[in-house]
Image (tube, coloured by chain):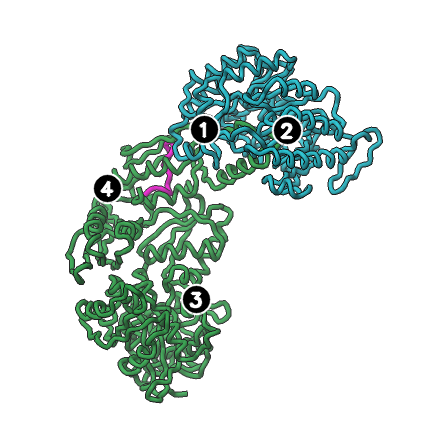
């Protein structure tokens, strides 16, 4: 983590159709709503741009309104997530980036990611993104099997994805992530591996593989909430997980976080920022920010968000204890783990003085690895990481 | 101050739970004008919050009121409140002994219940004049004529002129008051004779010390009397005497034969002032005490442990405070390997246990772990020695046990005939011996059973309720001890016996109970890092087994910027859950697992 760095997250809460498992703040919307939303989002750009001192990086004033910002911040990453940001039109996307660059001084080599979903990525939009300086795409494929795509309520087939993926490649996108979802209802290890194999063979730079979580309030919850027996059991889930790990390792992917794999050098910088405590500013519906030890979140309904100005709906001031806990429970998500020296540097106290008992207990139980410098989860530790992480709170 | 005995009416109200006793008491207090309506709390007599919530009266309390009757005379009413539950039978009998009459409240829709019947018979035994009252006549389902008939048929008392009232709506309350004046006999007793006063309750007050509730039967008690408790032998000088205003004490100079009131003296502990004891004048003692005194003894025991071991001293203080007001509550320190330091507590019955537990949790903010309740077993050893066992883990080794005896109760269950089959099956399952059945009317019957006490202290009430859809009432009294084939059932978690889960059970039901306990524990104990066998064993023989499979997956698939707060809450919750666990060996057992095995009938 670099105290100077800050990341931007921009939430686009729109999609073509809500998927059956999705509990994100997103949904289909008409053009008027989108326009009103973007206008409001651009106000936020202006607000935070002003705060971070657009154009004044050399000799910037510090205090800006309620939130104080110490020293010049380097914006090293932008992530446009959703929903489906590419459900916006090519013009809207271009306009968004134009406005963004107008409001913020973004580092020349910053990682600029846009989430996209197959079925919304036409040549026009891809060119628009390319033209806007987007250098990383994160494509939500979820499965290479059409029956699973249908079950999930996706709007696309694997063929459609493939066409768009190839188009992106040929347009010169050289850093692409493909999201896949595992432990789906009725999924066998073999079926899951077919998707992993297919995706690996496409040679993206990054793969995220998530176990399905049946979230309350989704159609999946109605279907499976009371019927866990319809979902793969824990044994199958773990076999899929470890099978994925193995298959991707042999394809040259590094397993660098619980659910993330990357070709060397292509780890997602933005997400690593979240896990290492880098500050970030989230803009858009329900987006969360972390700034100088305060985590705050925007309104979570469109109506509230569009109507009221910058009143965060949630504010949480992190205490030293909170930050130490986050250091571990976020840091341990990464397979390289956390460094004792970094803990000491950040908190001025050795990790062993705060967490000595917890560390010893879990090392003894074979859940943590400890080489004296770095502490990380073992393979078994990853499987039941909540059991370990909760003890750092 | 002398009061004309002929103008005193001492009476109590007998009613089944929910039939409206407290409401009628409130109306009587209102009608006698001692309190204004504004001062009336909803149910004046029930002081404790807990009682109000449960709709039952725990500690007997009493009130004195002045009623101006239609004949123009003023009468002193002493309404003696009686506890309404089987656990407090003896207290009820002492309250009845302090009265000359009893108002029997019967719900116009529900009719007579088992418990009402038990109390009415007790009142008749004490030669009380019974005044039947039909309550809740304003209910659409009220059938007053049927209930009048039932009272005449079942109890055998005249009920044609029973007032038909609604205590809630205040209908016909004056009829009740007038009948009390006309029918309840005035007290007798010579104010000049040596003092004899019956103790029917006592409470501890931090200002006044022990306050003794009594009915003066003979003689007179005055401010300066030196009293002697004839059973406990305690002596003390009276500090204050007085009568009971609603919600407050009204001091006076003397109380003579026939009157009801209280005294305070330099008595430190309610143990000195046992219910049923006779108060006399130490300087002019009565030769014989009043009849009927008996020392109440606990029938049901369980271990109570603070969930947080450091709260042990607080638990002890709380038990001591409760005991000041509750001579029947007993406790002594005990240690459990699984639960740490706690107390083995003795109670009159299950309700008494429930009440104490709830008061500890509510009034003293203690988080408790309670072990399975046990009765007192008599163990006859091969060397001729006899020991009483209240904690199952203290049962002597089977090789030195010749035989064992367990307490048996005779139980009466009143039930709608449509549930007869279900209830008889329940009694059968609980090793009940059928004694007989009486039809109260076409739709209701009174079942008589002999049941081992240890079969009704777990979840019998709950089972009775659920299997009769609430239409059963239950009353029991201890009958005696009986030899029985009892075994000690141990529960082993990860091969280690957990003392707090050990219990004594009849040989025939051991297998079933062991199996159910293992199943229940398998559900209640969360999975851990390794497989955990749960076994039920008699001696070295394993009779049931379940396995809690090791936790294989407990992981948050993703956690990004916007998720962190929510995910942290999940982890916090998980950590909170861990805190409420007990470490037994290397297994973490949630506290509720210890309690869950008490309610096996739900399975």
Query: Label 1, on which residue?
Result: B529
Q: Do the residues bearing badges 3 and 4 touch, measured as CB atoms within 8 Å?
A: no
Label 2, label 4: how many angstroms apart (C-alpha)? 58 Å
Asked if both marks, 1 and 3, belong to the same chain, the answer given is yes
Query: Label 3, on which residue?
Result: B47
Q: Do the residues bearing badges 1 and 3 touch, measured as CB atoms within 8 Å?
A: no
- Please identify the quarter of the rendering in which residue B166 is found: bottom left
Q: Nearer the viewer, mark 2 or mark 3?
A: 2
Q: Residue at x 64, y 34 (%)?
A: A35
Looking at marks 1 and 4 on the same chain, the residue that comes earlier in the sequence is marked by: 4
Chain A shade in the render: cyan
Along the viewing direction, whichever of B177 and A73 lies nearer the viewer:
A73
Asked if both marks, 3 and 4, belong to the same chain, the answer given is yes
Q: Which residues are magenta?
A: B493-503
Query: Label 2, on which residue?
Result: A274
Query: Label 4, on which residue?
Result: B509
Quadrant containing the N terminus of chain A is top right
Residue A152 place in picture, x, y as percent:
46, 26
Asked if both marks, 2 and 1, belong to the same chain, the answer given is no
Q: Residue at x 50, y 21 (%)?
A: A156
């Amino acid at each position: 983590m670099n105290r100077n760095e800050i990341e931007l997250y921009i939430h686009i809460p729109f999609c073509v159709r809500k998927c059956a498992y999705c509990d994100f703040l997103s949904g289909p919307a008409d053009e008027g709503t989108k326009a009103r939303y973007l206008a409001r989002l651009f106000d936020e750009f202006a607000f935070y741009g002003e705060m971070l001192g657009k154009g004044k990086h050399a000799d910037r004033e510090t205090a800006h309104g309620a939130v104080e910002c110490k020293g010049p911040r380097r914006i090293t990453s932008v992530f446009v997530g959703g929903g489906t940001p590419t459900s916006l039109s090519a013009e809207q996307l271009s306009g968004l980036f134009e406005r963004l660059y107008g409001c913020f001084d973004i580092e020349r080599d910053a990682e600029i990611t846009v989430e996209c979903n197959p079925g919304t990525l036409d040549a026009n939009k891809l060119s628009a993104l390319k033209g806007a300086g987007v250098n990383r795409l994160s494509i939500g494929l979820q499965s290479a099997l059409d029956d699973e795509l249908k079950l999930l309520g996706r709007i696309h087939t694997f063929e459609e994805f493939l066409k768009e993926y190839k188009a992106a490649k040929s347009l010169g996108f050289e850093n692409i992530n493909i999201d896949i979802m595992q432990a789906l209802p009725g999924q066998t290890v073999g079926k899951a591996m077919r998707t992993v194999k297919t995706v690996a063979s496409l040679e993206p730079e990054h793969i995220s593989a998530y176990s399905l979580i049946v979230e309350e309030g989704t159609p999946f919850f109605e279907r499976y909430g009371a019927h866990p027996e319809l979902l793969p059991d824990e044994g199958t889930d773990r076999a899929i997980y470890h099978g994925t790990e193995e298959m991707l390792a042999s394809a040259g992917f590094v397993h660098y976080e619980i659910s993330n794999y990357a070709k060397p050098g292509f780890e997602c910088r933005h997400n690593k920022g979240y896990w290492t405590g880098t500050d970030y500013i989230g803009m858009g519906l329900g987006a969360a920010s972390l700034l100088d030890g305060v985590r705050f979140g925007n309104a979570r309904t469109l109506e509230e968000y569009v109507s009221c100005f910058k009143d965060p709906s949630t504010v949480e001031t992190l205490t030293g204890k909170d930050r130490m806990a986050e250091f571990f429970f976020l840091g341990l998500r990464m397979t390289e783990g956390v460094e004792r020296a970094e803990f000491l540097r950040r908190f001025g106290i050795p990790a062993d003085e705060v967490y000595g008992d917890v560390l010893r207990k879990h090392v003894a139980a074979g859940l943590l690895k400890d080489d004296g410098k770095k502490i990380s989860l073992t393979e078994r530790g990853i499987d039941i990481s909540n059991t370990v992480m909760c003890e750092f709170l | 101050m002398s009061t004309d005995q002929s103008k005193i009416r001492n009476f109590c109200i007998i009613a089944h739970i929910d039939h409206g006793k407290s409401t009628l008491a409130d109306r009587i207090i209102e009608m006698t004008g001692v309190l204004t309506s504004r001062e009336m709390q909803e149910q004046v007599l029930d002081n404790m919050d807990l009682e109000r919530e449960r709709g039952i009266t725990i500690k007997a309390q009493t009130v004195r009121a002045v009623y101006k009757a239609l004949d123009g005379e003023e009468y002193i009413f002493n309404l003696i409140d009686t506890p309404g539950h089987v656990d407090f039978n003896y207290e009820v009998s002492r309250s009845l002994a302090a009265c000359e009459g009893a108002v029997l409240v019967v719900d116009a829709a529900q009719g007579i219940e088992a418990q009402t019947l038990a109390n009415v018979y007790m009142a008749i035994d004490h030669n009380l004049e019974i005044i039947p009252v039909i309550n809740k006549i304003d209910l659409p389902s009220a059938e007053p004529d049927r209930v009048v008939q039932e009272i005449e048929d079942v109890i055998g008392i005249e009920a044609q002129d029973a007032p038909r009232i609604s205590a809630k709506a205040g209908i016909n309350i004056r009829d009740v008051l007038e009948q009390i004046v006309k029918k309840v006999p005035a007290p007798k007793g010579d104010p000049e004779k040596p003092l004899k006063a019956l103790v029917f309750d006592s409470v501890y007050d931090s200002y006044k010390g022990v306050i003794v509730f009594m009915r003066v039967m003979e003689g007179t008690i005055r401010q300066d009397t030196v009293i002697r408790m004839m059973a406990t032998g305690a002596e003390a000088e009276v500090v204050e005497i007085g009568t009971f205003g609603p919600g407050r004490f009204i001091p006076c100079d003397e109380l003579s034969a026939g009157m009801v009131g209280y005294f305070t003296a330099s008595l430190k502990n309610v143990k000195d002032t046992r219910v049923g004891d006779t108060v006399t004048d130490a300087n002019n003692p009565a030769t014989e005490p009043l009849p009927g005194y008996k020392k109440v003894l606990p029938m049901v025991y369980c271990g109570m442990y603070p969930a947080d071991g450091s709260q042990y001293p607080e638990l002890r203080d709380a038990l001591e405070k409760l005991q000041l007001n509750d001579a029947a509550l007993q406790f002594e320190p005990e240690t459990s390997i699984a639960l740490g330091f706690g107390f083995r507590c003795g109670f009159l019955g299950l309700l008494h246990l429930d009440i104490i537990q709830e008061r500890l949790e509510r009034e003293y903010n203690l988080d408790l772990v309670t072990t399975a309740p046990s009765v007192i077993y008599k163990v006859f050893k091969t060397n001729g020695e006899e020991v009483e066992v209240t904690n199952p883990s203290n049962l002597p080794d089977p090789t030195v046990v010749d035989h064992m005896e367990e307490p048996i109760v005779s139980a009466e269950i009143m039930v709608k005939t449509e549930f007869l089959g279900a209830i008889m099956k329940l009694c059968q399952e609980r090793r009940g011996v059928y004694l007989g059945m009486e039809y109260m009317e076409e739709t209701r019957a009174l079942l008589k059973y002999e049941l081992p006490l240890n079969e009704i202290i777990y979840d019998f009430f709950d089972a009775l309720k659920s299997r009769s859809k609430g239409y059963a009432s239950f009353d029991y009294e201890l009958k005696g001890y009986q030899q029985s084939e009892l075994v000690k059932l141990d529960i082993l978690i990860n091969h280690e016996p957990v003392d707090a889960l050990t219990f004594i059970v009849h040989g025939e039901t051991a297998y079933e109970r062991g199996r159910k306990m293992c199943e229940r524990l398998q559900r209640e104990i969360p999975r851990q890092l390794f497989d955990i066998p749960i076994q039920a064993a008699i001696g070295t023989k394993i009779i049931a087994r379940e396995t809690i499979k090791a936790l294989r997956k407990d992981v948050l698939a993703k956690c990004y910027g916007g998720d962190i707060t929510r995910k942290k809450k999940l982890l916090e919750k998980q950590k909170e859950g861990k805190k409420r666990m007990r470490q037994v060996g290397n297994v973490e057992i949630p506290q509720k697992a210890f309690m869950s095995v008490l309610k096996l009938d739900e399975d």
